[in-house]
Amino acid sequence: ELTSAEPLDPAELDFEGALRPSSLSEFVGQRRVVGQLDLLLRAAEMDSRTPDHILLAGPPGLGKTTLAMIVAHDSGRALRMSSGPAISHAGDLAALLSSLVPGEVLFIDEIHRMARSAEEMLYLAMEDFRIDIMVGKGVGASSIPLELPPFTLVGATTRTGLLANPLRDRFGFTGHLEFYETDELLQVLTRSASLLGLDIPQPALAEIAGRSRGTPRIANRLLRRVRDYMTVHPHEEARTAVDSALALYDVDPRGLDRLDTSVLRALVERFGGGPVGVSSLAVSLGEDAETIEAVVEPFLIREGLMVRTPRGRVATSEAWKHLNLTPPAADQT
Ligand code: ADP
């Protein structure tokens, strides 16, 4: 899916790498988190200590990995990258931690998906920079303490609520990343277009920005498709080229893609506009509930198309309008 906030393939990862800002000064938007991180890094440097562990929370594609790389880059430290799903037992984490160099930044993406046994090992590692390695099994088992070099853990998660409290509490700082404003995405796109040597007028870039669901990864991806379109249709005017390219990929004028639209349609047409639980919605669409909760829902809520109530998700009258349907008169939201 073109507007999936996850990277799609290796070619896209290369493309992203080329467009990734490498310092806080190049990083667009997120002024709050950037200011907080800047202070944290500067204080640590003045005190000559390893910066506190950092948790970055927010939907995919908003810059969590980029910020982790910047934390390492701006403080002149090495960076090791891993992810929750890659740490399927405590041994994986032990191997990772015991090979860190002093002061290294360890980035764990999707940290909420790490194995439970590894998570418990991580508590001690974060707090005391040591772990206990279990050797042997059953009655003969014993644990060997292992000192670790000081390191800074940067964890990323789509929502802090997915983390167990003891883990959440061990981060010195939690940065909440917000969706980007359209003018911020325009800055991202202007920078990307210039890095790629593309000559696209501002109104055309602004149109892409408006359809990017507040997400830089999606903005860059749409730019890539528009670039393709312009290569194939060199004589088409830029603004119409944007419209044609995005229509071709099912990105509607509001930035909703096929999945967003099908979630909204299911909510309205199958559940009468709600309230309905996210798991029922997911089942009715054959989709993963976590994707709907982490990616689709925050966007639809932000667009004013859906609200969360204690009894479940409800479509707003705006949602009915967007689908060219008439909301039920009795129960307008
Ligand atoms: P996440 O880890 O949150 O999924 P990433 O850090 O991988 O997101 O960002 C995805 C892409 O979006 C990167 O290639 C990066 O170039 C771009 N990007 C993200 N945030 C910004 C930003 N604030 N300014 C410029 N580009 C950004």
Image (cartoon, helix red, strand yellow):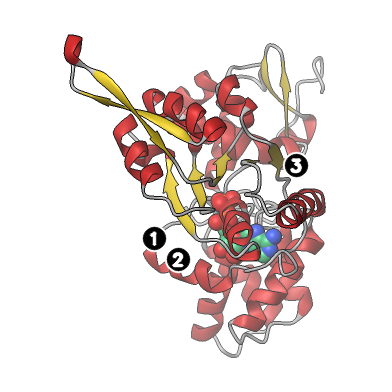
Amino acid type shown at disc 2: Glu
Distance, label 2 to label 3, CA atoms, is 27 Å
Task: For ligand 1, tell me if the residue under mark 1 lies within 8 Å.
Answer: no
Is residue 90 or residue 238 the one in the foreground?
Answer: 90
* Circle 1/circle 2 CB separation < 8 Å: yes
What is the secondary structure assignment of the residue under circle 3? loop
Kindly tell me whether mark 2's CB lies below 8 Å from ligand 1: no
Expressed as whole percent of the image width and height from the top left, the position of residue 290 reads 50, 31
Residue at the farthest bottom position? 235
Is disc 2 placed on a helix, strand or loop? helix
Marks 2 and 3, the one that precedes in the sequence: 2
Up-down: is 9 above or below 232?
above
Residue corresponding to mark 1: 9
Disc 1, disc 3: CB below 8 Å?
A: no
Could you tell me how far apart the alpha carbons at marks 1 and 2 are, in whole angstroms? 5 Å
Residue drawn at (18%, 22%) of the image: 136
Q: Residue at x 64, y 79 (%)?
A: 193
Residue where numbered disc 3 is placed: 303
Say which quadrant the C terminus sits in: top right
Q: Which mark is residue 12?
A: 2
